[in-house]
Amino acid sequence: MDISTIIFIILATIIVVSSVSVLMTPNPIYAAFSLAITMVTMGFLYFSLDADFIAGVQLIVYAGAVMVLFVMVLMLFDLEKETEAYSKGTFSVFLKLMCGLFLTGAVALSVRQSIKGLSDVAKVATPAEQVETIKLLAGRLFTQYVFAFEALGVLLLVIAIGVVAVARSRGGTHARH
Amino acid sequence: MGSDVFEITVNLVKMLFIFLLMVQLVPVLVWVERRGSAFIQSRFGPNRVGPLGLTQLLADAVKFLMKEEFVPAQGKKLLFYLAPAIALVPGAVAFGSIPLSCPVHIQRFLMLQHWWGPYDFEFQSFHFGVGIVFVLGISSLGAYALLLAGWGSANKFSLMGALRASAQMISYELALGLSLVGAILIYGTFDFTEMIAQQAQVFNFELLGHAFHLRKYGILMQPIGAILYFSSIFAETNRLPFDLPEAEGELVVGYHTEYGGLKMLMFYIGEYGHMMVGSALFVTFYLGGYTIPLLTTTQINNLFLSMGAGPNVISILTALVFHVAFFAKVLFLLWVFVWVRWTLPRFRYDQLMDLGWKTMLPWSLANVIVTAVVVAYVRSK
């Protein structure tokens, strides 16, 4: 067993344990922290696969911004009592496990279908090659897929404007009476 | 890591050295902060223990170690102990990926009846092709330490501090990232070493009948980006004028209200580590990294050659000279941090958010667009 296999096993174990505990913990804040651990470890898994750029973006966007916001909002509303009523007990644990296993099976099946017939993709190793991949990625994103890219941007803008509109009508932080 | 025992050993020692460099700079910075604040406020500062109060820190360390272990009764024990440990990680890891000097080249040599080499050692713990993306990603994890501390302490003041901290860090991360984009567009790379190599180039121009030879330092090409970046690292490191997560007049000391002794010290080390990463990034992006103005690598090499040194010794000594230059720049910026802290008053929270979202974000976006247009025009010529 070489060192990259050992690293993969360690990272994969952390990911599985933390993502199962996202489902199993009754406390929403612990669940959010477990999800954050999953996100960070996913980032390191990408690093170990030499996909440095995706790894960095994963850390910045998901682990650094999205999950911090999640945790922050959950701390603002202390939901411990309310959610424990729903998420404790044998039946709900059973339900959660079944849903999780079903999703895992569906994803695993579709991954197996899509990688069928693909040979091993050439690995990029040196920092210089990494930079070339980023340039390639940027070129594709801003020429071939520019419409989809811009449409996603507009979608996010719509969400942001919608949130501001909803929050303002109930008297947000800058409401004027 | 390396291909043989010698290379692996050197790389491990290098990692340890860079980590210790970061941690050992913290006591010096604490001393500078205390003496500097005293100097600015016309006081004496700590001056009783040892010459210039230098050994005050040793006494403080002993005090921190002897303090009582304490966890709040309602607190979450695991999170409470985890938070200070997590606070240390982002700074230490991010600092390791910034090149602190030029690479050292070692030629083949004989040791223990065995030929070793040739080797190229980079003056950084690890080299990622996407340097800046990695550093920004790792530093953005710093918010978790504050959130864990605030939640785990089961204290209203701690929680308020943690909430303020996370909102502030997310808001200013945008301005910080965007202010760097202009410089990244000009250099056309994420790699620190390449950025520094590009800044070492000289551009010549004539003004009022005088010929000027200037290095292409980032601060000359991206002055607005440099100012925006420098202001947003104050917010990212939670220092005055943006120290609302701590705000001792309003929140006791914010997220680390319940912490004492060595655990509080670890938060301090984390904060100073963040400052060091921020300053090192500023030096790498805008002040030419480890390069020295008016002095080229060849000139330094020739100087050591005239002293009669061998090629390996020359390489090591040149790297050390550049390392000192790099640290001189970083230390100057760290002094600016102290200087600003004891000069400016604290912002109000709504002023802080308005500055981040309504002033710095539009300016950095405008900077990106103007830079992109200029870069596209220059490259198409």
Image (cartoon, coloured by chain):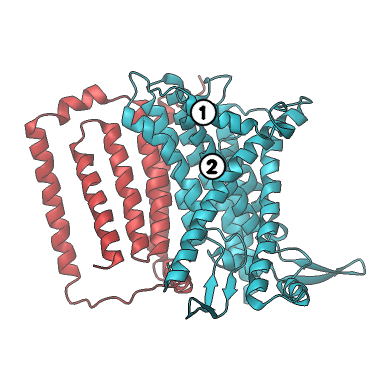
User: What residue is pinned by disc 2?
Assistant: B172
Q: Secondary structure at mark 2?
A: helix
- Please give the count of numbered marks on the rendered protein: 2
Give the residue drawn at x 52%, y 60%: B14
Q: Is residue A39 left or right of residue B136?
A: left
Measured in 3D between alpha carbons, the distance from the residue under mark 2 to the one under mark 1, in whole angstroms, is 33 Å
Whichever of callouts 2 and 1 sits on the residue coming sooner in the sequence is 1
Residue furthest front in the image: B113
Label 2 neighbour load within 10 Å: few <14, some 14-19, many 20+ = many
Q: Which chain is drawn using cyan?
A: B
Quadrant where the N terminus of chain B sits is bottom left
Amino acid type, label 1: Phe
- Residue B368 appears in which quarter of the rendering? bottom right
> Percent x, y for residue B134?
46, 56
Tell me, yes or no, if residue B240 can be seen here.
Answer: no
B93 w.r.t. A4: above or below: above
Residue B216, position as x, y percentages in the image: 71, 66
At numbered mark 1, what does the secondary structure look like: helix, strand or loop?
A: helix
Q: Chain of mark 1?
A: B
What chain letter is assigned to the residue under label 2?
B
Q: What is the quadrant of the C terminus of chain B in the image? A: bottom right
Left or right side of A1 for B53: right
Left or right position of B302 against B71: right
* Above or below, B77 relative to A5: above
Q: Does residue B13 sit above or below B308 in this rendering?
A: above
What colour do you see for chain A?
A: red
Specify whether residue B56 is in view: yes
Q: Position of residue B215 (x, y in %)?
A: 74, 66
The residue where tag 1 is placed is B64
Give percent across and percent down for residue A100. Answer: 14, 46
The amino acid type of the residue labelled 2 equals: Tyr
- Residues beneath discs 2 and 1 located on the same chain: yes
